């Protein structure tokens, strides 16, 4: 049995990031949201493109106004007016100023903006009542970005801010990694779909839907492969098809030590190399991870209990899926919080307890989900945004103490 750390590093080693040449798609800027940039982007223009004003006011030459004050104002001749979008034609001479508005291009030889609030206007003259700093309120050409240097690096997730950068740099065709295809199959004779009528002894296959949502939330394309019965032939057939058509396969059920748990044997028969068989974690101990070199496919055999299934996905599948997808920020995120409840564990496995983490007066607090903490209780898993971790060797983290939390979404 591997420790959580050992399992995590084994899995991350198996998940090699997509190649930016072979696994690339070109998408329009409008379709780039949420995608992972596959090649670094460089802009052709400085940003700002030219010196411009950060204020409504007057563009002046600093040396004309450096000594003025309310008692001894400098009076300048206003020779032109420049609005955002205008191209100033004239040069400011000593003793002159240009009326200027936010975002407008500075005229030649003006080097400083005096904000409107520090002036009074009389006809074509302006009185400067306060000496500005040299260069004040000028956004200088290239101050934010210099043409040709890297603008965004490969591996970043494209969101609103990155879209703004790409739009500004006039990058309209974006190289992104393709999304990994993730096959999802549920195993078990007891399973029916949410649409089917439920007979005594049967349960609804919730994992298929939960895992599809998980995959989509983490940059993958869920490929729902349905329910497969606990029949070795059927299962082998389904698994064989899955590994031939997807980048990652997630199957739930059939990986513990029950009489109907065939998954590990089938993976070996199909030529897979098993790297993980079980992990000292609760919930989710019977976790199988195998890879199929010929198919370039990573297989996760996940326990069937709905809580175990999602906790395994959050803890072990998510970093691997993100890494494969080219995302540079694939590691799990942890914070420290104060627990509002006692957190109990058997002490022999790293224990993950689900609940909610909130910011209270600037520090994080963790509240355990109410009700049973059975790994079959999917009901109180709803609204979980953090998993509190009780390390191996510890049986209790008492209410009021600090606990490490893994963030989930
Ligand atoms: P297994 O890992 O196959 O031994 O299943 C463990 C428990 O999880 C059993 O109580 C199953 O009925 C339940 N289970 C298995 N697969 C699913 C599924 N797809 N959706 C919901 N519960 C499941
Ligand atoms: Mg089963």
Image (spheres, rainbow, N blue to C red):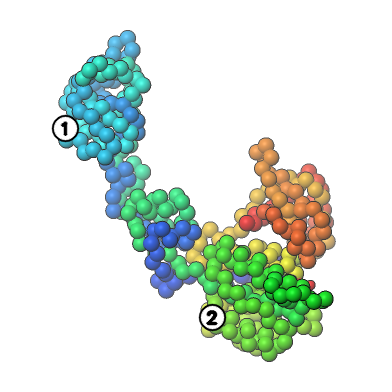
> In which quadrant of this rendering is ligand 1 seen?
bottom right
Asked which quadrant contains residue 362, the reply is: top right
| Residue 404: x %, y % from top left | 70, 52
Picture residue at 67% right of the left edge, 87% below the top: 234
Does residue 371 lie above or below 376 as drawn? above
Query: Viewed as shown, does residue 157 lie left or right of 240?
Result: left
- Mark 2 vs 1: CB contact within 8 A: no
Picture residue at 70% right of the left edge, 69% below the top: 206
Asked which quadrant contains residue 28, the reply is: bottom left
Label 1 Cα crowd, 10 Å radius (few <14 / some 14-19 / many 20+): few
Query: Viewed as shown, does residue 154 lie left or right of 16?
Result: left
Does residue 329 lie above or below 101 as drawn? below
| Residue 406: x %, y % from top left | 67, 55
Residue denoted by label 1: 90
Q: Is residue 323 among what the camera can see?
A: no
| Residue 109: x %, y % from top left | 20, 31
Does residue 367 lie above or below 243 as drawn? above
Q: Nearer the viewer, residue 195 or 222?
A: 195
Helix, strand or loop for disc 1? loop
Q: Is residue 342 among what the camera can see?
A: yes
Q: Which mark is residue 245?
A: 2
Of labels 2 and 1, earlier in sequence is 1
| Residue 157: x %, y % from top left | 48, 58
Picture residue at 54% right of the left edge, 67% below the top: 220
Q: Quadrant of the N terminus?
A: bottom right
* CA separation in Å, label 2 and label 1: 66 Å
Asked which quadrant contains residue 102, the reply is: top left
């Amino acid at each position: 049995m591997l420790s959580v750390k050992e399992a995590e590093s084994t899995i991350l080693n198996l998940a090699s990031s997509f190649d930016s040449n072979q696994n690339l798609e070109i998408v329009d800027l409008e379709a780039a949201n949420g995608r992972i940039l596959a090649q670094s982007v460089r802009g052709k223009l400085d940003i700002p493109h030219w010196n411009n004003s950060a204020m409504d006011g007057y563009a002046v030459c600093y040396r004309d106004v450096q000594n003025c004050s309310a008692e001894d104002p400098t009076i300048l001749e206003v020779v032109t007016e420049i609005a955002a979008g205008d191209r100033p034609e004239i040069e400011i001479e000593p003793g002159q100023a240009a009326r200027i508005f936010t975002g407008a291009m500075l005229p030649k030889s003006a080097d400083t903006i005096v904000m409107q609030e520090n002036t009074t206007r009389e006809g074509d003259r302006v009185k400067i009542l306060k000496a500005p700093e040299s260069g004040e309120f000028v956004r200088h050409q290239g101050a934010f970005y210099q043409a040709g240097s890297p603008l965004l690096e490969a591996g970043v997730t494209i969101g609103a801010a990155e879209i703004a950068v790409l739009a500004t740099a006039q990058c309209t065709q974006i190289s992104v990694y393709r999304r990994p295809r993730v096959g999802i199959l549920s195993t078990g004779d007891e399973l029916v779909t949410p649409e089917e009528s439920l007979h005594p002894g049967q349960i609804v296959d919730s994992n298929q839907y939960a895992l599809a949502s998980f995959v989509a939330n983490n940059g993958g394309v869920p490929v729902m492969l349905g329910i497969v019965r606990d029949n070795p032939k059927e299962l082998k057939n389904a698994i064989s098809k899955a590994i031939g058509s997807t980048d990652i396969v997630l199957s739930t059920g059939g990986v513990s030590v029950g009489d109907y748990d065939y998954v590990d044997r089938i993976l070996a028969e199909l030529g897979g190399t098993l790297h993980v068989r079980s992990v000292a974690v609760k919930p989710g101990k019977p976790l199988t991870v195998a890879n199929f070199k010929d198919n370039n496919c990573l297989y996760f055999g996940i326990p069937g209990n709905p809580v175990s299934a999602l906790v395994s996905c959050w803890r072990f599948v998510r970093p691997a899926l993100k890494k494969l997808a080219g995302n540079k920020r694939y590691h799990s995120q942890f914070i420290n919080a104060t627990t509002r409840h006692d957190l109990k564990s058997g002490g022999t496995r790293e224990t993950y307890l689900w609940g909610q983490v909130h910011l209270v007066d600037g520090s994080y607090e963790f509240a355990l989900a109410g009700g049973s903490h059975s790994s079959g209780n999917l009901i109180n898993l709803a609204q979980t945004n953090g998993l509190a971790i009780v390390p191996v060797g510890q049986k209790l983290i008492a209410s009021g103490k600090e606990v490490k939390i893994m963030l989930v979404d």
